[in-house]
Every structure is written in C-alpha cells, then in structure tokens.
Amino acid sequence: MKVTKDKVENSEAFLTIEAEPTEVEESLEKAYHSLVKRSNVPGFRKGKAPRPVLERHLGKERVFDEALDHLFPVVYKKAIDEQQLKAVAHPEVKVESKEPVVFKVTVPLVPSVELGDYRGIRIEEKPVELKDEQIDVAIDNLRHQRATWEPVERGVEYNDMIILDVESKIGEEPFLNRKGFQYQAMLDSKFPTTGFAEQLLGMKAGEEKEFTLAFPADYSVESMRGKEASYKVKTVEVKREVLPELNDDFAKQVDAKFETVDALKKEVTDSLKSQLEEKARQEYEEQTIDAAVAVSKVEFPHVMVEAEVDRIMREQMERNRMKPADFMEYLARANKTLESYHEELHPAAEKMLVRSLVLGKILDTEKIEVLDSDVDAEIGKVVSRLKEPKEAERLRMFLNSNGSRQQIRERLLTRKTVQYVVDIAKGSGVSVETKSEKEVKKND
C-alpha cells in the first residue's frame, strides 16, 4: 500500500491511497466467499460455485465492487495509522482508479481552536430604558384584548371587523372562497395579499365589489409571486371596536388582584422592565461570545457543519412534533426541497458550531467544572416548579438518571463558561471559580 498526504487544510486531510495487488487479490477472495454464500448459481449448491463461475454469473464488476467494500476499510485504517491522523467522523472516499486500485480520501480531523486574547475583551453594558410609550402600548394591548365590537351603518374604516362573503380565483384555480369570513381591515395588512384591506374601505353592509390584485414579488409562496387573483366580495356586516375605559374596574377585569389602575400599571411596568433586562442580558452574552470568536482562529471539517444542520432539523421536528413525512410536507408547502433547506441552515449551523468550539476551548483552558451538588441544585430547581408530589418525584427520578444528569451537567458547563466570558467583558472580576483557582487556594 502506498499513501500520499496531498494536503491538510480546514481540519481535513486529503490522502491518495494505492492498494497493492496482493491486497486487492485478498479482498477479491473475501468478496467471492461472501457473495457465493448469498448467490443461487444454476447447477451448483449455494456456496459451492467456483469463483470463475460466480464471476460469469454475477459479472466481474459486481464481484470487484464487493471486493472494494472489503478492501477500503483495511487500507484506510493502515493509512491513517501510518500518517498518525485522528479521524472524528467517516471519511469521504472516491475510487480514482481500478487498475491499480487508487482511492482519493478526505479525512475529517479533530477541529483546531486557537484562542485569542479573550481575557482582554471589554464591552460596555447599555442601560435598559423603559419609555412611557412602551407602557402605554402594553396597556392598550390589554384594552384591545377585552374590547367589544358593535355594528355600524357607515362604510368600512381601518381597524374595523368585517363579515364577508368572498369568492376568488387565480386564473381558473379557486383561491379564497368563504362565506361569513371574519376579517379585520388593518393598515398594511398582507393577507390574503397586499391591498385587499384597502379595497374594502368605504363599503357598507350589503354592498358588493369585484377587483383584481397581483401578488407581490416577495410573496411568501414563491409559485404565486406576480400572479393575479380576482375577487368578488360582499360585505355582510361592519363592526367597530369599542375599547373599555381605563379605570379601576378595568384593572379588576384583567386580574382580581389589581384593585386600581395604578396597581395594574406597576405590574405592567415591572414585567416590561424584566423583559427588557432579560433581552439586554441575552444580547450582551451574544456580543461577548462573538467577541471571543472574533479574536480566535477556528478550523473544522465540513462534515461537522452537516452534522449540526441535521441536529437543528431534528430539533425542529421534535419541537413541532413532526414525523419525517410531516416535515417533508412542510417543506413542500414552503416551496423548498430538503437540499435547499439544508443549504439555508448552513450559516446558522456554522455560527453555532464555531461558538461551541470556542466556548469548549475556554472551558478546557480555564478548567471550569460543574460539581454533583450543582447538578442536584439544578434538578431541585426544576422539580420545585411542580406542585403535585407524585409528578415531582417522577420527574426527579427521570432527571437523576445518568443520561439526564449528563445533559444537565453539559448545559451548566456552557452556562458557566458563558458567564465567565461575560464577567471578563464587564471588567467586574470573574465570578465563576475555576478548577485551577480552587487548586491554587487548596495549595495555599
């Protein structure tokens, strides 16, 4: 066997492996013995046909291909051992030549991470600002949720609720056809297409109208872009929104615990502030991780990105309780193929992979650890959310299984590592005590 390392880049080694004739012959013999046991050759009992007869019966190509299946794992193992390569996944292989037998192989190697000066990262925190307008909007949303609708004799205005009979088609194909269709005429509404709400303005109950609208070039369904839909609508009823008065009675309608409007506003204010603070915290974490990535050099084999894409799609299916057939149907409705969606996920998958590799390297460098007591505390926190004792105990038993504890440990390790980088970026001193720091204290 002859092995040539053509190049190594992006944590991938590109090899040329040429098998010796003796190795090929050994594999042909193995292929023959394997195939003859599975083949029915006329005139011979199964497993008894001579090799030349079997090759005539199945074809030499079939036997040779079987031999290559036996040969490659053997020469590949010898090749990566000889070149002292550590593969992290199955290689990509191409048969370059059959005489002599030559394989072109791409070997995915352990990713390489060179951390930059992440300890020098400093990022200023932006103060959280809650404006009065945001509180007013939140209160108005509560009023809209409890609004009533009353019939009016006038023509349709924006924000009105309309009961419609609709007939429509695209060419000769039916599109939206419904009686008693409840539709709110919102400004800039894009349903069923841009301009539909505008066409209804001024119509009174009992009036009919016909019109044609084109689907915009950026319409969500690609196959309908630029096409025209013809509509025939009849306004059955027009209703206007009546908002409840903002007073203490309204506050009690929202929740009996609110005795006054001021109490409701305080709750809304506190909730909005908490949301803004959580959003700011997440954005700051994102900035610090991106900063750590920016000063680091990361190389990885492309198969790791493919694996990350597959993981994202599996999580999407699990989250939406989809079977593979349901997922394919979803893609078809979105006018996407599995291949195109796979490609679409590549940038996000690569970003997540790089972040994970950098955080993993920081974790190892700083010797950040999670103790059993940390895992126990996290389990206790999750279990405490359940009020039913039996359910809580079942959950505790599940979370204490080896697999669940390991998942929790990994999640806590990531959380601690992110917090470590966040504390550095704030310049406030690291709050996460690392294993190396504990060892120093112990020695002191």
Image (cartoon, grey):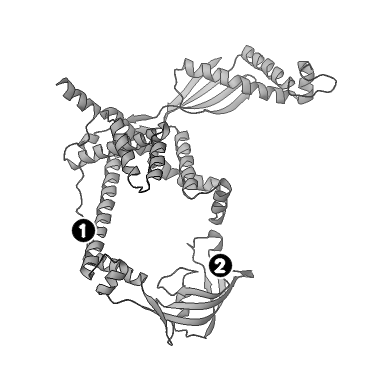
Residue beneath disc 2? 227
Q: Position of residue 208 (x, y in %)?
A: 54, 84
**What type is the residue that disc 1 sits on?**
Glu
Q: Is residue 303 above or below residue 132?
A: above
Distance from the alpha carbon under mark 1 to that under mark 2: 45 Å
Q: If the image is split into quadrants, where does the N terminus sit? A: top right
Residue 183 can be seen in this image: yes
Residue 140 appears in the picture as rendered:
no
Q: Nearer the viewer, residue 268 or 58?
A: 268
Observer-nearest of 320 and 94: 320
The kind of secondary structure element at disc 1 is loop
Q: In the rendered image, which quarter is residue 312 located in?
A: top left
Secondary structure under the numbered disc 2 in the rendered image: loop
The x and y percentages for residue 432 are 22, 35
Left or right of residue 312: residue 99: right
Instruction: Look at the image and tell me in which quarter the C terminus lies.
Output: top left
The residue under label 1 is 129
Q: Earlier in the sequence, mark 1 or mark 2?
A: 1
Amino acid of disc 2 = Lys
